[in-house]
Amino acid sequence: MKSKESDKALKTLENNTNWPDSINRPLVGSSDSFVDKNTRSEEILKSNCELLRVAGEMARFGGWSLNLAENRVLWSDVVAEIHGENPGYTPTREEALNFAAPGWADKISSVVNDCIANGTAFDEDVQIINRSKNLVWIRVTGKAVTNQEGEIVGLQGSMQDVTERKRSDNSLLESEKRLRELNATKDKFFSIIAHDLRSPFYTIQGFCSILSEQVRAKDYEGVDEYAEIIQKSSQKAMDLLKNLLEWSISQTGRMVFNPENLDVYLLLHETIELLRDSAKQKSISIELHAHQDIYFTADKAMLSSVLRNLLSNAIKFSRLNGSITLSAEEKDNELLFSVSDNGIGMNDTERAKLFRIDETHATKGTKKEEGTGLGLILCKEFITRHGGKIWVESEPEKGSTFFFTIPENTA
């Protein structure tokens, strides 16, 4: 004879269970026997367990337990599959730990031992290498299991394959990092414009003032020379603006890499001519060391910008009556360029900050010229786009030499 308690419990189960279509839901108050209702309850339980199993498989989520007395780990089928093992595999504690990826064994051992010794529950993301030698990220949780005396006799918990989630998280982190770099690059870009355009406009302003005074005084000596300097400085400013705007386009991925056949000697000569007036103001000599029959393939706008920035920096950090050398030579299937000066040089700390988007290296020139060092970031980007490298050798008070390479098969 069924009890009121069992009948009440069954009715509660009936009213709160989503019955599968394959099971006819009994009517409350029907004359079904207790056995029939108990059978249906078992069917419901089995059905729910099956749904839970399917959900676990789809979510790559399963359970585990550790029996300390037997030193065995019981894995659900999903957990065994995550490790690349067959269902029913029950490793020892040491065998389970052997799945830890390099660098993770100490972390896993630490949280497990702490749980065994102190009952401290854990929830960690760790890496393992499964039987197929694949690296897998898993989220593993665990808590202590105690007997009636309160002694810890084992552990139990859950485990889930979170590799795809980690990949998504890493992708998101990379995107965030890229966005931060783009924001920093945007700010630096505007600073570069101000930095690189300041010099020619200073030249234009200075010689325009001289011309204005001489015209008022009807003194026309040197007017032609001053006008030519103004014209060249204006052209240089236009060229700088053009290349900087092209670089801004490159930051949005819309810049076309346009390699063409270039004359090395002519490219270096054009760069020197663009900045010769700036060098004259400090009585700096510029020498060109390159054969006139060397040709290579590169993007002219990018390479011109690199050479212009390096030469401009060399002038900035050279003293009065200093000397600068631009050179190029063929070496090991690539072209090696260098811009060398005998200026103030740099120490190791200063060199380490160059070419980095996350560092701003700002040092005034020998005539207190303002600068940010941002042009070197542009140089690195353009050289990297060509598949080359850029670096510097320098010592305090002994000058600096900037080197960069361009592979001969640039495409």
Image (tube, helix red, strand yellow):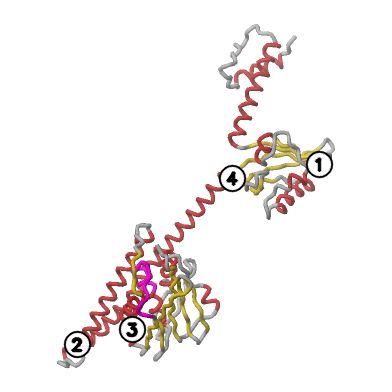
What percent of the width, then of the height, locates residue 236? 29, 76
Tell me which amino acid carries mark 2: Asp
Q: Are marks 4 and 1 in contact (CB under 8 Å)?
A: no
Numbered circle sitting on residue 224: 2
**In the depicted structure, whether residue 246 falls above or below residue 60:** below
Q: Please report whichever mark, 1 or 3, sits nearer to the chain's N-terminal start.
A: 1
At x 74%, y 52%, the residue is: 110
Left or right of 182 on screen, residue 5: right
As measured in the structure, the alpha-carbon distance from the residue carrying label 3 to the one carrying label 2 is 18 Å
What percent of the width, then of the height, locates residue 182? 42, 60
Q: Secondary structure at mark 1?
A: loop
The foreground one among 399 and 353 is 399
Q: Are marks 2 and 1 in contact (CB under 8 Å)?
A: no
Q: Please report whichever mark, 2 or 1, sits nearer to the chain's N-terminal start.
A: 1
What percent of the width, then of the height, locates residue 5? 71, 17
Instruction: Classify 10 Å Cα crowding around label 4: few (below 14), some (14-19), many (20 and above).
Output: some
Instruction: Single out the residue that lies furthest toward the top.
Output: 31
Left or right of 215 on screen, residue 402: right
Q: Secondary structure at mark 3?
A: helix
Numbered circle sitting on residue 170: none
Q: Secondary structure at mark 4?
A: helix
What segment is highlighted magenta in the picture? 291-306
Numbered circle sitting on residue 278: 3
On the rendered image, what quadrant is the N terminus found in? top right
- The residue that disc 1 covers is 71
Q: Is residue 163 magenta?
A: no
Q: Is residue 299 magenta?
A: yes
**In the depicted structure, whether residue 79 falls above or below residue 309:** above
Q: Please report whichever mark, 2 or 4, sits nearer to the chain's N-terminal start.
A: 4
**In the depicted structure, whether residue 409 falls above or below residue 352:** above
- The residue that disc 4 covers is 163
What percent of the width, then of the height, locates residue 332? 48, 72
